[in-house]
Image: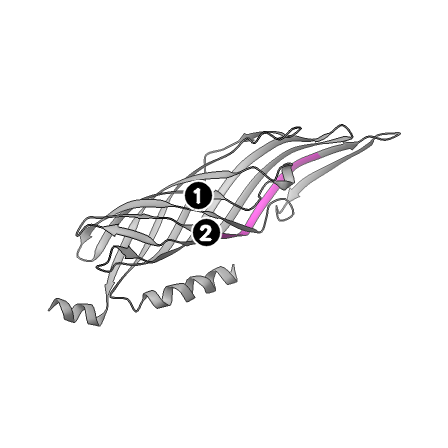
Amino acid sequence: MKWICIGFMLLGIPMLSAGQVQIGIKAGYDYFWFTQPEEGHFRAKYDYPNNSFMIAGSIRQRTEHVFNLGIEIQYVNRSFGVNSNFGGLGGNTHVDVDYRIGQILLQLQPQFVVGSKVKFFIYPGIYFGTMIHSSCTGIIDSWQMGLPPITRTDTLNGSAKDYYPAFEFGISPGLGIEFPVYKTLHFVFEYSFSMNLTSISKAWGSDQVKMLNMDFEIGLAYLFKSVNSKAAER
């Protein structure tokens, strides 16, 4: 968490010296699901309560050029259930666990912006994430072949820090539209897609599962102009 905030400040400060800088806040709905890779003995089913949400703050250049830099720090809250089986001929593990995960994500968003009053933008993005709070409840049953067979049941009721990665990295491209509602105050609608590139699912039996996210966000952004840009307009 500390390093993400430091990174946000270090990347954001140089942008404040640009001709025009936009600082915004957004909120929205995070729709996500998991892929189902074909992996031999691995099988999984998921339950999505559909109550995930996100809030974000951003700093973005708004110069006369098409290419503008942008960064965003985002809080995402997700919950889901996992029911999986994995193993082989010598043993098997069954996981039936409910997760609730809160993360902070730092997103780098180099943007291509077109338009005058109404602006359209698109960006190829990447993100770095860290888990800041979590809960994990359920059971993990396992057995291993032997004489007699070895069986074990773990009951989970606490933090997910041992069952979900603390660090996450992935891609997060997006696009959006913004238009003025009052002087330099703008309304923003944005859509972004993200996918993890680091493993998130070892705890339920796979290195190949991907979490796919679609974020639908609305918010407000205020455009700050430097002294130089104000003088040029006179």
Q: CA distance from mark 1 to mark 2?
A: 8 Å
Where does the magenta region start and end?
128-140
Q: Quadrant of residue 215?
A: top left
- Residue placed most toward the observer, 113 or 76: 113
Q: Main secondary structure of the magenta part?
A: strand
What secondary structure is found at the residue carrying circle 2?
strand
Question: Does 23 sit above or below residue 42?
Answer: below
Q: Dividing the image into 4 quarters, which one contains the C terminus?
A: bottom left
Q: Are marks 1 and 2 in contact (CB under 8 Å)?
A: yes
- Residue placed most toward the observer, 51 or 211: 211
Q: Which mark is residue 138?
A: none
**Magenta span includes 75:** no
Question: Does 144 sit above or below residue 132?
Answer: above
Residue 45: x percent and y percent?
57, 28
Labels 1 and 2: the sequence-earlier one? 2
Q: Which residue is mark 2?
A: 127
Residue 159: x percent and y percent?
62, 47
